[in-house]
Amino acid sequence: MRKLLVLLAGLWSFMSFSQQSEWEFYKDIDGVKFETRTIECSGNELLTFRISNMNDYSVNVLWKEEVWMDGICKQKGDSVEDERELRLLSGEIKEGTCDFKESFYIGSKVKRGSRVMILTHFDLKNITVSK
């Protein structure tokens, strides 16, 4: 029984890991690096971000998100609702996870009832980094 439990735990761990892609470089602005990857959370795929402050000082990062789902613009990146802000200490890294605490993400493959919406384009616009 114990061997079976260990085998099942190992298999579950492998399956959970395989549902996440590798981090891909997106942008580097004034010493702040943005990377993306897709993760699965509660049956949906999310494009999540890892944001790293490579500077030797704290920074405030501000940007606006433009999001297109199924070829239709859902967020233009020009309103206050599209704005995101993050404070990072020197050398600090914030990484998106399924617990959504201090996490930045965009739905990549989102189920709404029987309908599945697919992310077709995104952009982080007007990124500013300040001390």
Image (tube, rainbow, N blue to C red):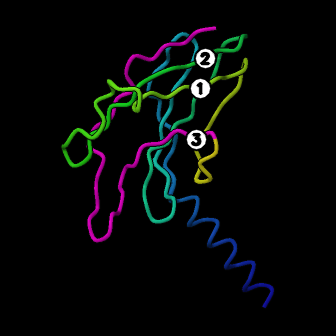
Majority SS type along the magenta span: strand
Q: CA distance from mark 2 to mark 3?
A: 15 Å
Q: Which mark is residue 75?
A: none
Which corner quadrant of the image does residue 103 belong to? top right
Q: Is residue 116 above or below residue 99?
A: below
Farthest residue toward the left? 71
Residue 107 among magenta residues = yes
Residue 63 among magenta residues = no
Estimate how packed mark 1 is, as few (under 14), some (14 to 19) or many (20 or more) residues with alpha carbons within 10 Å.
Answer: some
Residue 19, horizontal then vertical, whole percent: 50, 59
Q: Do the residues bearing badges 1 and 2 touch, measured as CB atoms within 8 Å?
A: yes
Residue drawn at x 34%, y 29% as measured from the top left: 123
Secondary structure beneath dot 2 equals: strand
Q: Amino acid at mark 3?
A: Ser
Instruction: Name the residue that disc number 3 marks.
Output: 103
Residue drawn at x 35%, y 63% as measured from the top left: 111
Residue drawn at x 29%, y 62% as measured from the top left: 116
Which corner quadrant of the image does residue 17 belong to? bottom right
Q: Which residues are magenta?
A: 102-131
Q: Is residue 101 above or below residue 93?
A: below
Instruction: Name the residue that disc number 2 marks.
Output: 60
